[in-house]
Image (cartoon, rainbow, N blue to C red):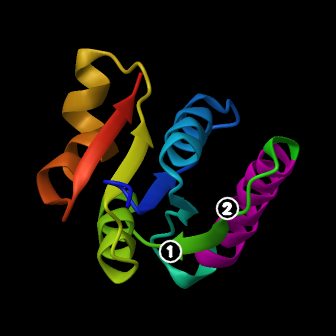
Amino acid sequence: MPVYERILVAYDDPSTETLERAVDVAEALGSTLIVTNVAAATDSAEAEEAERFAGERLDQARSFLDERGLAAELITSVGPPAEAIVKLAGERNADLIVVGTRKKGFFERLVEGSVNQNVLRRAPCDVLVVY
């Protein structure tokens, strides 16, 4: 039985580094893969556009997964990214969350915060941050 039976990957970057790492781990361990993109909408007016964008990202993920011959559950989430990722990990009983990081400067991190740092602090399971 794999150590990480269910792996949740937060995919929001058009590059596939984070998704590639999650797929590599899932294939090596025989894990189930769950891919999410969070539509970070602050009100209902933004929600529709944000969900459309999230759906486009998941379509990109599906294409990548199809090329690798790997099936995954694809889920669009809505809300503050870190909160949505942690909530979904709990709902799906994820054993590992895989998140990427953007190379932000000190000021950007100070003002905007960091999704991966917030996930690390609140996650119900292990977290792998892909740089």
Position of the N terminus, as image quadrant, is bottom left
Q: Residue furthest front?
A: 1
Which residue is drawn at the image coordinates 23% and 17% (left, top)? 106
Residue bearing the label numbered 1: 78
Residue bearing the label numbered 2: 54
Range of magenta residues: 47-66
Q: Where residue 56 sits: x, y (%)?
A: 79, 58
Q: Earlier in the sequence, mark 1 or mark 2?
A: 2
Q: Tell me the element at label 1.
A: strand
The reply, left or right, for residue 108 in relation to residue 61 is left
Q: Determine contact: label 1, label 2, CB under 8 Å.
A: yes
The vertical placement of 8 against 24, above or below, is: below
For label 2, count other residues whose C-alpha is less than 10 Å away and answer few (under 14), some (14-19) or many (20+): many
Which labelled disc corresponds to residue 36?
Answer: none
Q: Tell me the element at label 2.
A: helix
Which residue is drawn at the image coordinates 23% and 50% (left, top)? 126
Task: Look at the magenta stretch and give its main secondary structure.
Answer: helix
Amino acid, disc 1: Val
